[in-house]
Image: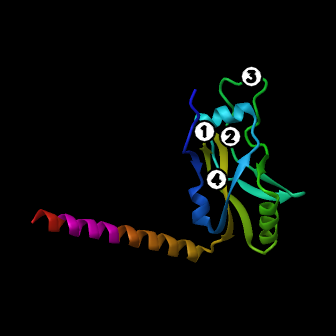
């Protein structure tokens, strides 16, 4: 059987990019049980309430909802258990040092399979104020309007 290659996204946390300024991102492996992997292969996961923390020189992922596997038996996992993230010791130290700053948090951004292995992208985020969120939405809308106007201008020019 050929091995999987490439990146297959399972879940993304779009709300995190809306709520936080993401300053730095890291890719981490996850310690999962068999039924969690099978549930992820079905494309079922939710990152919206999730967060991460460093405790005792280990990185942990909290409140990420991976629903129970439908064909699972008594070996099934609990949906919101804490999961260990696999990072290098230097990365954990760097993350811990930056998280001691006030207002920074570690949020999951994406959950995906990379070459057949479950990975999570985590980001160090600084919380946005309400006016920052409005500014971001305004910029996004302006860019959308600008690209729409450009495509309409190109379409009109090509039709003559």
The reply to whether discs 4 and 1 touch (Cβ–Cβ < 8 Å) is: no
Residue at image x 79%, y 74%? Answer: 101
| Residue mark closest to the camera, 4 vs 1 | 1
Residue named by callout 1: 44
Left-right relation of 156 to 41: left
Q: Quadrant of residue 99?
A: bottom right
Mark 2 and mark 4: Cα distance apart in space: 12 Å
Residue drawn at x 58%, y 47% is 11
Residue bearing the label numbered 3: 73
Q: Residues within 10 Å of mark 4 (few under 14, many from 20)?
A: some
Give the secondary structure at mark 3: loop
Please tell me whether residue 84 is drawn above or below residue 140 in the rendered image: above
Span colored in magenta:
146-155
Q: Nearer the viewer, residue 102 or 158?
A: 158
| Distance (Cα) linking label 3 and label 4 | 27 Å
Real-space CA distance between mark 3 and mark 1, rounded to the nearest whole angstrom: 18 Å
Q: Residue furthest right?
A: 56
**Is tag 3's residue or tag 1's residue first in the polypeptide sequence?**
1
Q: How is the image coloured?
A: rainbow
Q: Earlier in the sequence, mark 2 or mark 3?
A: 2
Asked whether the beta carbons under mark 3 and mark 1 sit within 8 Å of each other, the answer is no
Q: Residue at x 73, y 31 (%)?
A: 34
Q: Are marks 1 and 2 in contact (CB under 8 Å)?
A: yes
* Residue marked by disc 2: 66
Residue 84, how many percent across, how many down?
Answer: 79, 48
Which element type, helix, strand or loop, lies under badge 1? loop
Residue carrying label 4: 48
Q: Disc 2 to disc 3, how far (Cα)? A: 16 Å
Density class for disc 2 (Cα within 10 Å; few <14, some 14-19, many ≥20) is many
For mark 4, give the secondary structure.
loop
User: Label 4 to label 1, Cα distance in Å?
Assistant: 13 Å
Residue 72 placement (x, y as % from top left): 71, 25
């Amino acid at each position: 059987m050929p091995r999987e290659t490439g990146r297959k996204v399972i879940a993304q946390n779009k709300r995190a990019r809306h709520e936080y300024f993401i300053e730095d991102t890291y890719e981490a492996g996850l310690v999962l049980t068999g039924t969690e992997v099978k549930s992820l292969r079905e494309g079922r996961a939710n990152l919206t309430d999730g967060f991460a923390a460093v405790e005792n020189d280990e990185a942990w992922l909290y409140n990420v909802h991976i629903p129970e596997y439908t064909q699972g038996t008594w070996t099934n996992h609990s949906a919101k258990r804490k999961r260990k993230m696999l990072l290098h010791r230097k990365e954990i130290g760097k993350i811990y040092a930056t998280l001691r700053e006030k207002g920074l948090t570690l949020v999951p951004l994406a959950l995906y399979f990379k070459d057949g292995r479950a990975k999570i992208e985590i980001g160090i985020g600084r919380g946005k104020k309400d006016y920052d969120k409005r500014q971001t939405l305004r910029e996004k809308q302006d860019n959308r309007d600008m690209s729409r106007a450009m495509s309409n201008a190109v379409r009109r020019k090509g039709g003559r």
